[in-house]
Image (cartoon, helix red, strand yellow):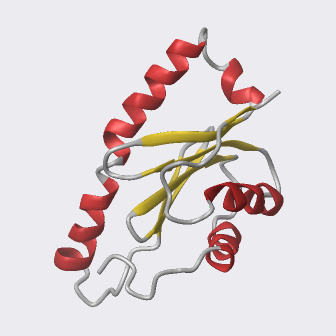
Amino acid sequence: MPATNRSQLCSFDADRVRQVVRNTVSGPLYAFCEYDTESFRPLYIADETVAMYESRDAMLEHFERIHTNVHMDFMQIELFRNTLFPDADRVEYIATAMDFLKILRVYVGDDGLFVSLEPDEPVEPIVDAIKETVAWPENQNS
């Protein structure tokens, strides 16, 4: 049975968003987490993901290493908007594709969603579904 937790970090209903994302993806959803600059909370971890680790502690240690780097997303948003692309009004998401996994990080105000998927999963339908589910901030990243 997949591991699940209730949302505690996001200013919106991340549990509802998780269900919408699960219904949107065409392949497996390996993980769905919420995060901000200080905290990282797994809301859904698939059995396949849990099975990749030799223990629960090893999995949580790896997730902590991921969060140590993912919180830098919010700093990168400022870099993209203020330095690299000053004409951009906002950064909505960043996708990272690897040979065995795709990571999608979606930003809603000061909150982030971390979603791991199959490498060939299209991200735009997921982002669109998230946008339709939450009150997308007009002043996103400002």
Residue at horizontal 62 percent and vertical 58 percent from the top: 14
Q: Quarter of the image holding residue 104?
A: bottom right
Q: Position of residue 21 (x, y in %)?
A: 73, 59
Locate the C terminus by quadrant. Answer: bottom left
Q: Quarter of the image holding residue 13?
A: bottom right
Furthest residue toward top: 54
Horizontal side of 41 relative to 86 (left or right) equals right
Locate the N terminus by quadrant. Answer: top right
Residue at horizontal 44 percent and vertical 88 percent from the top: 138
Q: Position of residue 61 (x, y in %)?
A: 44, 21
Please state which of residues 112 and 118 is positioned toward the viewer in this rendering. Answer: 112
Q: Position of residue 113 (x, y in %)?
A: 53, 56
Residue at horizontal 66 percent and vertical 76 percent from the top: 128
Q: Quarter of the image holding residue 121?
A: bottom right
Horizontal side of 6 relative to 34 (left or right) equals right
Vertical order, 89 against 97 (above or below): below
Q: Position of residue 35 (x, y in %)?
A: 45, 49
Residue at horizontal 68 percent and vertical 62 percent from the top: 17
Q: How many dots with numbers? A: 0
